[in-house]
Amino acid sequence: MDTAYQTNWDTAFHTHYGFQNQETAYTAAWQKHNKIDQQIASLYEVKMFTGADCRQCKEDRRTILP
């Protein structure tokens, strides 16, 4: 934390974590998190049961299914 206050956050990320700057650190974290989410999501199947006359079902089909 002292590095960030003495210089700047990009230098601190590079010094302590080896990333070029904050953006590359955040991008790497997001990509890792997103890959894990996709792996978990692929394990599940969501089934949606609806009724032809159900108003909420019509809204759900319009917003969720596409």
Image (cartoon, helix red, strand yellow):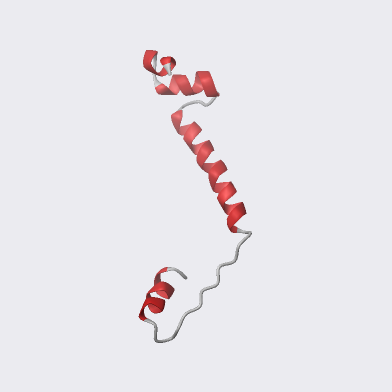
Between 57 and 15, the residue placed more toward the observer is: 57
Residue at the (50%, 25%) spot, across then down: 20
Q: Residue 25: give x, y in percent of width and height.
A: 50, 32
**Can you give x and y, in whole percent of width and height, for residue 57 in the image?**
41, 77
Q: Nearer the viewer, residue 40 or 26?
A: 40
| Front residue of this view, candidates 56 and 34 | 56
Residue 28 position within the rendered picture, expressed as x and y whole percent measured from the top left: 53, 37
Look at the picture and state if 21 lies above or below 32.
above
Give residue 44's quadrant in the image: bottom right
Q: Give the residue at the far top of this rendering.
A: 6
In the orientation shown, which residue stands out farthest toward the bottom? 53
- Screen quadrant of the N terminus: top left
Q: Is residue 29 above or below residue 61?
A: above
Q: Position of residue 65 (x, y in %)?
A: 47, 70
The residue at 47%/80% (across/down) is 50
Position of residue 29 in the picture relative to residue 55 (left or right)? right
Image vertical order of residue 24 relative to residue 56, above or below: above
At 59% from the left and 47% from the top, the residue drawn is 36
* Count of numbered tags: 0
| Residue at (58% x, 53% y) in the render | 38
Q: Is residue 64 above or below residue 32?
A: below
